[in-house]
Amino acid sequence: MPTPAPRSRRAKLGVVRRTERITPHMIRVVLSCDEFTGNGMTDMYVKLLFPQPGVEYPEPLDMGVVREQFPSEQWPTMRTYTVRSWDEAAQELTIDFVHHGDEGIAGPWAANAKPGDKLWFNGPGGAYTPDAAAGWHLLVGDESALPAIGSAIESLPAGTSATVFLEVEDATEEQKFGGSGDVDLVWFHRAGAGAECGVRLVEAVAGLEFPSDDVHVFVHGEAGFVFGIRKNLFAERGLPRDRVSLSGYWRIGKNEDGWQAEKAETARKEREAAGN
């Protein structure tokens, strides 16, 4: 019997058109991609695939083929990034990268990216966009959530009310957003505040007087503060779960691989406990 062909997981190819450092620690990379199709979500994300040093992969890159033909230590490293914008007419995909020197994989790649460089990726995924029928919107996040929140802000129609709490390192990391909604945007700075990541976001949400319960909520970023805000929204305010989008993008002290492994282990333990 012939050996079955590996399942196709063909990646999409983006080619760098230009880059821009929009703040001291945020780099914007614009890719051309004629294979991409947007999904209409403002938290649209892609899985970027970074090759292992010294390993050559057959092109077009297909993760099904890679997993079949290469040992696991030679598989590309995957990192999840939110799409800042997709311009279908220009076939331009824009992704913002947080850059802290040589730390990590994606940030250093963005810092050294030049026109013509290739970037393979899978996606898009995503499940949130602001509900136009909501009475108002609450959006909360740190640097990792800025692309999704910026996209959400710019999608709000005129007259739509939104309260936005954002935390960055200092004033130099603040960004300007477009859009025509009625947005109350508050920036929090970690530098000199004497507070851990996200603590002031948790405090801001806890102290906020909600204009009404007819709210659509988006809270994404570091897992610790997301969990703190989750408790306030559900246990204390009793908001319906289908009106709240929550995601811990990352965890302090862990890269994406470590954080995903921790989440998987937590989910496994919860399933076991539920079965007892």
Image: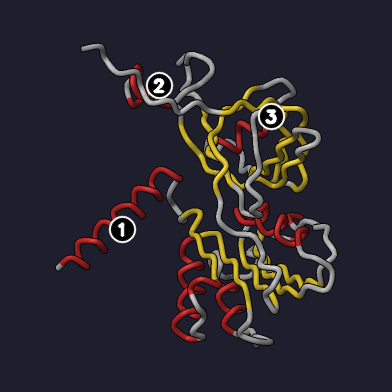
Provide the residue designation for mark 2: 66
Secondary element at tag 2: helix
Provide the residue designation for mark 3: 33
| Image position of 194 (left or right of 63) | right
- Residue 200, x across and y down, in percent: 59, 73
| Image position of 51 (left or right of 115) | left
Count of numbered badges drawn on the protein = 3
| Residue projecting furthest to the left | 276
Q: Nearer the viewer, mark 1 or mark 3?
A: 3
Quadrant in which residue 121 is drawn: top right
Q: Are marks 2 and 1 in contact (CB under 8 Å)?
A: no
Q: Residue at x 70, y 79 (%)?
A: 135
**253 above or below 117?**
below
* First in residue order: circle 2 vs circle 3: 3
Q: Are marks 2 and 3 in contact (CB under 8 Å)?
A: no
Secondary element at tag 3: loop
Quadrant in which residue 197 is drawn: bottom right
Secondary element at tag 1: helix
Q: Amino acid at mark 3?
A: Cys
User: CA gap, disc 2 to disc 3?
Assistant: 22 Å
**188 above or below 255?**
below
Q: Amino acid at mark 1?
A: Ala
* First in residue order: circle 2 vs circle 1: 2
Q: Which mark is residue 267?
A: 1
Q: Dividing the image into 4 quarters, which one contains the C terminus?
A: bottom left
User: CA gap, disc 2 to disc 1?
Assistant: 28 Å
